[in-house]
Each structure stands twice: as structure tokens, then as C-alpha cells.
Image: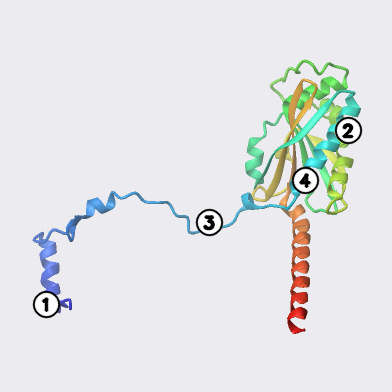
Amino acid sequence: MEKILSKEEIADLLSAVRQGDIDVETVGSEPVSAVSERPAKACNLFRTVGPENWKLKDYDLILDSFAKNYAMSLSTRFQRAAHMKLEALESMVFDTFVQRLSGRGAIGVLQLEPLLGGGLLIFDEQLSFSLVEMVLGGNSDAKALIPERPLSAIELNILRDVIKSACPEVNRSFEQIKKVNSELVNVVSNLRLLDFVSPESGVSAARFQVAIETLEGHITLVIPHTALEPLQKKQTSRIVSSSSLQSSKWQQLVCE
């Protein structure tokens, strides 16, 4: 049994420590300095599940359908072979996404009834300026020279019909889970001037690689999580109903 120090012994011990008679730099046989040199692991006790982990089941199938349908629409419009495929699907904070934009591409602002929050269809600068040339009768074989400036109001107006033609394809793709009526509200070049969603809101960004003959670029479809959450809840309710049904059948079999 370990010895318990008396008050007098504790007082003597503290006095010896203050006077330097006892070396406090050692703990047993191991120096304190050796303990402090051990590597420490960072631990965030306040981390919660953020928008980066947000997912909608089978959303990639909807996006693949949109890519296929819109590629056919572009082929018909420009009478050139167009290909489009989903390259990346990410969930992030909206402010983080805005920081990635160059500010020189065309941005179509969509209304997605009955989904709240709308959506964005963003054409990168290479695709935007090249499509302007193609609409005006230019050749798609050579890449358009990208000026160090945003698109002008006239150029944005030229691209309006090209972006608007994506709306029926969005509607057709979402029919798999919900009837959606998308409409083009506006076409802009500076997203920071829009009151789309709050900077800290979560969004789902689907980036597509687009090729029209030798022309290559990217289109990004951005939809807030708040707009997609009703679809997520709808899927969850279906799973719960199915589980409840199976549970009731098992109960009947057990009772019989």
C-alpha cells in the first residue's frame, strides 16, 4: 500500500521544490522533455458533417441523362458532332465554388419549379467565347481568342438561346424522380453581383466536359442543397415505407 503524505510532509516537499532541492524535470526515470517531443495528432472536437458529405442517391444518373440529351441538342443546333460527359460531381460551400470562377464565362440563372433556390448553368470562358464565334458563323476548328475581359452584354445575349436550350433537357432528366419546370431567368458574367444563395450555403456542382468537333470546354450545373433536399427526403420516405412493409409481413408470419 502506497504511503500517504501528511500535511507537514507535503509542506516540506513544496518547500524543497521551491528551493531547487528536488529536480522536477524528471518523471520517474523518463525526462519530461522526452515526453514533450512525442508527435501529437490534431483533433477537431467541433467538426460536424458539412456540405462536402451531402449526397443524393442516383443523382449521377440524372446528370448523365442531361449530358446525353444536351449534347444531342447542341449537335442539332450547330450541325456539328457534339459530345458531353459528366467529369466531376462535388458538394461544397457556395463561397468556395465562387472562388474557383474566372469571372469571364457565361452564367445562366435558372428557375427550377417547384424546387426552391433555382440553379446555375455556367459555361467556362473558352466555351463561351468559342460559341459566340460559332453562333455568328465562325469555325469550331480553331479555338477562339479569349480576351482579358468578361463577356459583353451583346455576347451574353448571343449565348442566351444556347443556354436556354438546356432547360428542356433538364426537365427531361429530372422526370425520373420528379417533374421539374426549368426556365432561364437571366444570363450574366459576374456571379458576385447575384443574390443566388448565402455564401455559407451548400451546393452541388456537376462539371461536364464538352467537345464540339475540336472545340473543348466545360459546363457546370450548380443546384443548392435546399433545392434538392425534397428529392432526398422523398427517397428516404420510400425506403422507410418499404422497410415498414417488410416488417409488417414478418410480423404476420411470426404471429401465424
Above or below 76: residue 232: below
Callouts 1 and 2 close, C-beta under 8 Å? no
Q: Could you tell me how far apart the alpha carbons at marks 2 and 4 are, in whole angstroms?
A: 19 Å
Point 82% across, 40% down: residue:
66
Residue 174: assigned label: none
- Of tags 1 and 2, the one toward the viewer is 2
Q: Which residue is mark 2?
A: 73
- Of tags 1 and 4, the one toward the viewer is 4
Q: Secondary structure at mark 4?
A: helix
Q: Could you tell me how far apart the alpha carbons at marks 3 and 4 are, in whole angstroms?
A: 31 Å
Where in the figure is residue 202, as x and y percent of width and height?
Answer: 67, 50
- The quadrant in which the N terminus is found is bottom left
Q: Which residue is mark 1?
A: 8
Q: Residues within 10 Å of mark 4 (few under 14, many from 20)?
A: some
Q: Which residue is mark 4?
A: 61
User: Which circle's residue, 3 or 1, is located before the other in the chain?
Assistant: 1
Callouts 3 and 1 close, C-beta under 8 Å? no
Please, what is the three-letter code of the amino acid marked with disc 3? Answer: Arg
Which residue is nearer to you in this view: 145 or 42?
42
Where in the figure is residue 243, as x and y percent of width and height?
Answer: 74, 69
Q: Residues within 10 Å of mark 2 (few under 14, many from 20)?
A: some
Please, what is the three-letter code of the amino acid marked with disc 4? Answer: Leu
Outermost left residue: 21
Residue 196 appears in the picture as rendered: no
Which residue is nearer to you in this view: 145 or 35?
35
User: Which circle's residue, 1 or 2, is located before the other in the chain?
Assistant: 1
